[in-house]
Image (cartoon, grey):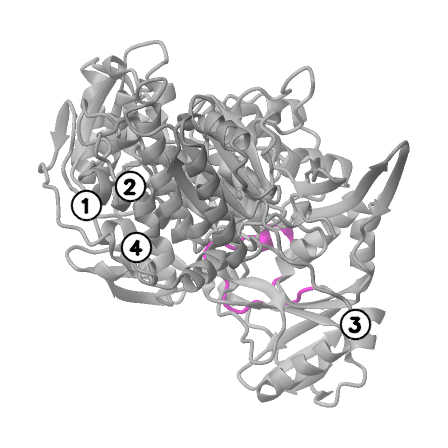
């Protein structure tokens, strides 16, 4: 797949369709790839990679890239990225006419932390086809099951469909039956006290690095309310639990109905807070109360929070749930 | 012997200018009683209520927050309360999800003519929140005066 | 040198904790952190904690002082933590070196008394490394991970924990612990450190001499391009020391906080005239120039990085000081 993606990138540059392409650049190791803009054949041949550690969602970079002068920017998008790509077009953030979008078939991205959590130290490289990965380490070779080291979001992938692309490399995928709400349902089944303890335990680790916000394709405000010294809630560090709660509730609320569930927030969190569970709660509620909705799946439906029905349930529906839910 | 002071919750009521704010007035002119610890904040429409206002009210010491707006279909701006309805439903559900007592938040539709409903709603809400006690799960320790 | 059987480790911790607060690195690898020791707490399997030991001396948020206004009077209420002695166990050689760097910033004139108090009260017990991660590069900065500094240095083998007091504070701490006996640690095996992939960083060009040349290098654009502008690297860094002062009006009084700041943020050093580093490129450059150029230029060539590798592991887009050093430091063909 990497060779086909690289060949396509070179083709886009040399045919003159694009003067730059957005892709993944090799790092010091096999897993620390960085999103980068490539402008020449040499760079692509030397440094462009596409593999099981290219997890970064590329769509947000297109906000800035599509506004630059010059020819089109070529962009390689995984299925998740295409949902964000469409959502951002819906919000008029990406200038579509300046982008040449190439969809890339995705087999699911691996999580280096999961590899490490499997007890593998000093990782130098990984390779292998099919279900097993061979990992080279400072202490010799080890093999692991690929499924066991998939990122959480990929283990419960919602769709492998590539949307709104000019071209596709590999196979077009399908929407999948996904168990992504299982954990949310598990939390809902707990008592309020248990839920409170769970979230305090998680959110209290927050260091307010803002990585979740800055990586989020739905968080594309020019100036975030939490960065505005005049908002009265600007805070660089959470001095107590209220600020941690406030930040995460408000951030999840701001993206509710627009979040495509790409899972970037949880991927980037240095403290491994399962932030996607907040967003998925909103998605699950929206699905249950207002009908199935997938942000970014199409170009014309109204987002559920910018919409209403005369017979929507009353807010008391929350109070009327069973006492243990 | 020291007598333990009875807990009196602080309630913030966000009231739509076109209905429940007038409803509160009416209940006053009709001499209907509702507790003095309900602090009313007037907003131009129920959909003006940013979720941040609710959280900030809790931060600054509220024990319960209630939103009163026009009955669905009667919004002064035609559809504002429909949007507010969705937002508040989702927000309350999220607060509940985080383990914050769901009875601390409520939405009631109260028209300008429903002075009695306003008073009854406030009495009931104050009673519910009194039972719950102090807001501990969404408090900001900095704002607690010793 | 002293030794303590591994089986007696809990007793050693209990004895230390009985005298003063004891912090140990604990928790699963993903969320390992220094926490106050409690009965039954286990040391983490992770090589290092997510956040560094810096937090215990320079906390992320600190309430410095409160102001209360009554009539025409302003009352100033000092809000220092009481000066409590404490011990941090299991600090790695890299984190330990970071205190040399922080000391030069906070303990020079004017002295930061909040930091100073904690430094005076804190005893650092370091732990030698035997199984480094691939992201480790402390040896590039002349740190020997098999012989860490600190008030007390520790080594382990399968049976014993070996302890060596390096300072008076350390001597005092170790004296009178019944589970300690005399014993020498076996020589450390350094071969694995020779195989570390990042051990040779091209650092010769960095330091004060080439400041303007490095500042103006065109490569910064490409390096900074994908930076998200989050503060992850700065907040997990053991040597980042920037902070901001924020005031909070509680309605009753004003609380003045000191909180960590990040040069990656758009409002870092924001002034009434605006932001002196208007785009992410300047902010990104600031961080790495500070570590590799500005700091050494004012501190006898000592770098402001200790090679702990946290930013390599945590950066959401995997851009880090190693990539910067290699891009700018390698001789062009």
Q: Which span of residues is magenta-colored?
A: C129-148
Query: Is the C-beta separation of discs 3 and 1 under 8 Å?
Result: no
Picture quarter with the N terminus of chain C = bottom right
Residue A26 visible (yes or no): no
Q: Disc 3 is attached to a residue of which chain?
A: C
Viewer-proximal residue among B31 and A179: B31
- Tag shown at residue A158: 1
How far is disc 3 from disc 4 in space, using C-alphas? 59 Å
**Mark 1, other Cα within 10 Å: few <14 / some 14–19 / many ≥20:** many
On the same chain, marks 3 and 2? The answer is: no
Query: Is the C-beta separation of discs 2 and 1 under 8 Å?
Result: yes
Secondary structure state at the residue bearing disc 4? loop
Q: Residue furthest right?
A: C73
Q: Is residue B53 left or right of residue A24?
A: right
- Tag shown at residue C170: 3
Pointer 4: what residue? A321
- Tag shown at residue A261: 2
Residue drawn at x 30%, y 47% as measured from the top left:
A317
How far is disc 3 from disc 1 in space, using C-alphas? 56 Å
Query: Is the C-beta separation of discs 3 and 4 under 8 Å?
Result: no
Secondary structure state at the residue bearing disc 1? loop
Q: Which label lies toward us, 1 or 4?
A: 4
Secondary structure state at the residue bearing disc 3? helix
Q: Quadrant of residue A289?
A: top left
Residue drawn at x 51%, y 21% as measured from the top left:
C218
Viewer-proximal residue among C210 and A246: A246
First of labels 4, 2 by sequence position: 2
First of labels 2, 1 by sequence position: 1
Query: Is the C-beta separation of discs 4 and 2 under 8 Å?
Result: no
Residue C321 in the image, given as x and y percentages of width and height = 53, 41
Q: Which label lies toward us, 3 or 4?
A: 4
């Amino acid at each position: 797949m990497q060779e086909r993606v690289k060949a396509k990138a070179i083709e886009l540059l040399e045919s003159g369709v694009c003067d730059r392409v957005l892709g993944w650049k090799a790092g010091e190791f096999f897993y620390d790839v960085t999103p980068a803009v490539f402008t020449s054949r040499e760079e692509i041949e030397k440094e462009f990679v596409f593999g099981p550690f290219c997890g970064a969602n590329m769509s947000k970079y297109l906000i800035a890239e599509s506004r630059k002068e010059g020819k089109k920017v070529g962009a390689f998008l995984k299925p998740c990225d295409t949902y964000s790509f469409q959502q951002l077009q819906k919000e008029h953030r990406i200038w579509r006419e300046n982008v040449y979008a190439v969809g890339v078939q995705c087999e699911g991205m691996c999580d280096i932390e999961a590899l490490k959590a499997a007890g593998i130290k000093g990782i130098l490289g990984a390779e292998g086809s099919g279900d097993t990965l061979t990992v080279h380490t400072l202490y010799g070779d080890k093999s692991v099951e690929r499924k066991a080291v998939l990122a959480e979001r990929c283990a419960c992938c919602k769709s492998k469909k590539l949307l709104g692309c000019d071209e596709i490399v590999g196979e077009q995928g399908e929407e999948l039956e996904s168990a992504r709400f299982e954990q949310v349902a598990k939390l809902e089944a707990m008592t309020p006290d248990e839920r409170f303890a769970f979230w305090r335990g998680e959110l209290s680790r927050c260091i307010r690095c803002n990585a979740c916000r800055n990586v989020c394709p739905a968080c594309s405000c020019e100036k975030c309310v939490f960065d505005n010294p005049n908002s009265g809630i600007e805070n660089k560090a959470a001095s107590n639990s209220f600020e941690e709660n406030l930040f995460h509730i408000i951030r999840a609320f701001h993206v509710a109905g627009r979040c495509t569930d790409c899972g970037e927030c949880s991927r980037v969190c240095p403290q491994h807070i399962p932030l996607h569970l907040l967003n998925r709660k909103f998605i699950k509620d929206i699905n249950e109360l207002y009908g199935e909705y997938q942000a970014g799946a199409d170009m014309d439906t109204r987002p559920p929070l910018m919409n209403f029905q005369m017979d929507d349930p009353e807010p008391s529906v929350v109070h009327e749930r069973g006492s243990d839910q | 012997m020291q007598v333990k002071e009875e807990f009196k919750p602080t309630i913030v009521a966000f009231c739509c200018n076109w209905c429940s704010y007038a409803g509160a007035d009416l209940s006053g002119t009709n001499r209907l009683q509702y507790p003095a610890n309900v602090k009313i904040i007037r907003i131009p429409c129920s959909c003006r209520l940013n979720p941040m206002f609710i959280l900030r009210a809790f931060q600054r010491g509220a024990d319960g927050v209630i939103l009163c707006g026009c009955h669905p279909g009667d919004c002064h701006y035609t559809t504002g309360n429909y949007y507010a309805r969705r937002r508040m439903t989702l927000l309350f559900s999220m607060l509940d999800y985080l383990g914050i007592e769901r009875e601390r938040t409520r939405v009631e539709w109260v028209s300008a003519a429903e002075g009695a409903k306003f008073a009854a709603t406030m009495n009931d809400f104050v009673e519910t929140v009194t039972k719950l006690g102090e807001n501990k799960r969404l408090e900001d320790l900095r704002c607690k005066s010793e | 040198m002293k030794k303590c059987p591994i089986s007696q480790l809990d007793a050693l911790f209990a004895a230390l904790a009985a005298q003063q607060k004891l912090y140990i690195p604990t928790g699963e690898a993903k969320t390992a952190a220094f926490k106050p020791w409690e009965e039954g707490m286990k040391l983490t399997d992770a090589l290092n904690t997510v956040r560094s030991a810096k937090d215990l001396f320079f906390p992320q948020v600190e309430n410095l002082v409160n102001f209360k206004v009554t009539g025409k009077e302003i009352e100033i209420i000092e809000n220092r933590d009481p000066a409590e002695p404490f011990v941090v166990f299991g600090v790695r050689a890299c984190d330990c070196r970071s205190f040399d760097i922080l000391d030069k910033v906070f303990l020079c004139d004017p002295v930061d008394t909040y930091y100073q108090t904690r430094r005076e009260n804190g005893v650092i017990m370091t732990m030698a490394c035997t199984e480094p991660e691939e992201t480790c590069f402390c040896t590039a900065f002349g740190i020997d991970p098999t012989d860490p500094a600190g008030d007390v240095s520790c080594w382990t083998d399968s049976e014993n924990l070996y302890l060596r007091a390096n300072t008076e504070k350390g001597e005092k701490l170790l004296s009178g612990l019944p589970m300690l006996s005399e014993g020498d640690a076996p020589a450390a095996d350094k071969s694995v450190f020779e195989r570390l992939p990042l051990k040779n960083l091209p650092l010769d060009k960095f330091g004060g001499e080439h400041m303007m040349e490095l500042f103006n290098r065109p490569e910064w654009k490409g390096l900074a391009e994908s930076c998200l502008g989050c503060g992850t690297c700065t907040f997990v860094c053991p040597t980042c020391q920037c902070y901001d002062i924020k005031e909070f009006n509680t309605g009753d009084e004003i609380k003045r906080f000191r909180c960590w700041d990040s040069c990656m943020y758009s409002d870092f050093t924001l002034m009434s005239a605006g932001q002196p580093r208007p785009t992410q490129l300047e902010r990104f450059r600031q961080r790495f120039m500070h570590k590799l150029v500005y700091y050494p230029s004012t501190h006898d060539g000592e770098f402001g990085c200790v090679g702990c590798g946290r930013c390599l592991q945590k950066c959401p887009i995997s851009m880090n000081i190693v990539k910067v050093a290699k891009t700018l430091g390698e001789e062009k063909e």
